[in-house]
Image (tube, grey):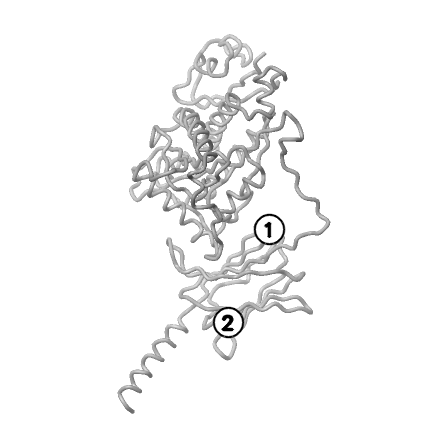
Amino acid sequence: MKPTHIAALCITLLFAGFASAADVRDVRFWRAPDHSRVVFDLTAPVSHEVISLSGPDRLVVDISTAEMKAATDTLTFENSPIQRMRYAAKPDGKLRVVFDLSDAVQARSFFLAASAGQNDRLVVDFLDQQKENEPPKVVKSVSETPQRDVVIAIDAGHGGEDPGAIGPGKLREKDVVYKIAKKLEAKFKSKRGYQVVMIRDGDYYVGLAKRRDLARKAQADFFVSVHADAFTHPSANGSSVYALSQRGATSASARILARRENEADLVGGVSLSDKDHVLAGVLTDLSMTATLDASLSVGAQLLGEMGKISRLHSKRVEQAGFAVLKSPDIPSLLVETGFISNPGEARKLATSRYQNQMAQAIFEGIDRYFRESPPPDTYFAAVKRGTVAPSNDVREYIIASGDTLSGISARHNISVAELQRHNGLADSAIRVGQKIQIPPVQ
């Protein structure tokens, strides 16, 4: 055999060896409001083909040179069109995976190369069929009433395939921030004048651009994204608030955090063909300047409240190019509730009590801003003008470190005596974690 033929044979064997090296080592299922997702966790890159079949309805996925090594017996596909999954090796070396379906579906699939600590993955999405007779969801309209609700979009960071930062004891950021977000939702829902939209309302991933789009579709007046940061050194601590930057990042840490958060789509599973449709020049628009001003104002209120229950990592609102905040017409903030990589802060973040305190601080900051600077067609604007009587809502307040009864009374425009009377307090002594009620201002 000639040397050139030997070299060609070696190259062929090398590529054949590489091509046969892919194992499917895990299969995961996620259910989102508009689709079902199956993720194949791989040990090497693969190519694939998707085929739709009818009579009965099936979706076939042929994966090149792969072998199933995952245990799939306990895999379930609740609340989805997938009835079961089966697989077999084909004579040509491909792995054929068949999904038996309850109905025909549209599917999309894409390969995600290893990045950000994740292995190579093949993602298959089963898109829900649109129901023709389903009425469109009604969102707030400025023409419906002169006293509309303020719409708050609450975004729990990460989710699904993307766990976010991992703390001691495998505490996952996506779980912590979702619990805080749900507590924050309850606080807004309990007060007259607010309507809440949850960007993710379960354990699934939402792309960064889609998070903004969902807020805009709901015509949100404010967007808040809740996170829990991590750093290479466990001593890093403190909570912080971030807004979008029109220029560069205001600090090195803000720049690093923005880069890490912007990589979430690679972990969460967003196709590279999914484009960000925000115009590149949007940051020069005058409306963006007004939106940023409002964001910074709300951020200052948030820092004031968060500083009562936690150390602040930064005492000013930091700014950087966070993709999730790039809404030109919605004031938006990203709140880092603490460093989940810090053992002490992780212990606090894992507790329902601290999650509630953090949710209360975020609520107080946003609520104060909209009561002081309400959109002109809202209930809060009517109250401020005196054309509508204020709500009779009784508000719960959790005592934080540094609080005094006189300080609380001043912030809520109510006398110390009234606070004592309403809460049955014999004197001005209060303790951290104590719950009191703030009666309505008469």
Q: CA distance from mark 1 to mark 2?
A: 28 Å
Where in the figure is residue 375, as x and y percent of width and height?
Answer: 55, 26
What quarter of the picture does the N terminus occupy? bottom left
Label 2: state its secondary structure: strand
264 horizontally vs 126: left or right? left
In the image, what residue type sits under mark 2? Leu
Q: Residue at x 69, y 52 (%)?
A: 131
Specify the label residue 95 is tagged with. Answer: 2
- Tell me if residue 289 comes above or below residue 278 in the rendering: above
Total labels drawn: 2
In the image, what residue type sits under mark 1? Asp
Label 1: state its secondary structure: loop
61 horizontally vs 7: left or right? right
Examine the image and state in which quarter residue 333 appears. Answer: top left
286 horizontally vs 220: left or right? left
Q: Nearer the viewer, residue 316 or 165?
A: 316
Q: Give the mark nearer the N terminus: 1 vs 2.
A: 1
Q: Which residue is mark 1?
A: 34
